[in-house]
Amino acid sequence: MHGSPWVGWLLVLLCAGAGAYCLARARSGPAAQRVEARGEGLMALGMAAMALPASAVAPPAWSPWLFATAFGAAGLWALLRRHLHHAVGAWAMVYMAVAMMVPAEHMGQMGRMGRMAHSAPGGVPLLTGLLLAYYTVYVIGAGVRLVPAAGPTAEGPVADGPAAAVGAGPAGVLRACRVTMGIGMLAMLLAL
């Protein structure tokens, strides 16, 4: 990815932490939640690998192809399972991998040959803008849903402390991991 190595390392830590937690959660709970946690964990670890700063670890020339293939397969799997958000995330990663493959001088030529009106070194501005808008709305919406409603509930008064801020139990933490991954995706798109 382009941009500051510090941002890259922060993205690596953020995504690797979310991925490790999701994979740890994939070991227990109902089968449907385990499958979903496994998929999210692998996606987050893939995001961490893709966010490694090039100045610290020189990526091999074939790595964008590997990312595009792996995330493309994940996107098709998500579509087959009717998980639209996961499919959008996987295809956004494919888009970023392809943007890493195509040199900046060829992006302008692709714009003239195809239907793209204007393109920049970091990808096609319209597509990047649409993905940025999608993830901004997703992060804000999912983040708002993490905050508990004020006032007493049917079970009694609202709980105090950090656990109340992310919902009840492990399900709330998994939702927080999804928000974290959305924030990571926003940062990766901005660094594209």
Image: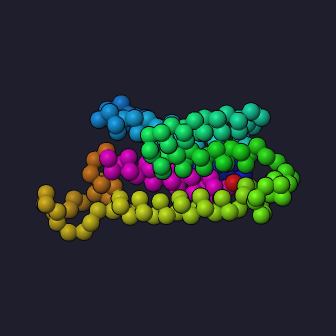
Q: Is the magenta stretch mostly helix, strand or loop?
A: helix
Q: Height in image: 57 above or below 183?
A: above
State the residue in front, 15 or 31. 31
Left or right, 130 with reference to 110? left
The total of numbered circles placed on residues is 0
- Locate the C terminus by quadrant: bottom right
Examine the structure image and report whether residue 176 is included in the region drawn in magenta: yes
From where the camera sits, is residue 31 visible? Answer: yes
- Looking at this view, name the residue that lies furthest to the bottom: 151
Q: What stretch is highlighted in magenta?
A: 171-191
Q: Which residue is drawn at 36% across and 35% down?
A: 34
Q: Which residue is drawn at 29% across and 35% down?
A: 30
Q: Residue at x 35, y 59 (%)?
A: 146
Q: Height in image: 146 above or below 72?
A: below
x and y percent of residue 106 in the render? 84, 51
x and y percent of residue 99 in the render? 73, 49
| Snapshot quadrant of residue 35 | top left
Q: Which colour scheme is used?
A: rainbow
State the residue in front, 179 or 85. 85
| Snapshot quadrant of residue 113 | bottom right
Left or right, 146 with reference to 152? right
From where the camera sits, is residue 45 visible? Answer: no
Left or right, 134 with reference to 144? right
Q: Residue at x 73, y 55 (%)?
A: 123
State the residue in front, 5 or 71. 71
x and y percent of residue 11 in the render? 58, 49
x and y percent of residue 178 in the render? 44, 50
Examine the structure image and report whether residue 14 is included in the region drawn in magenta: no
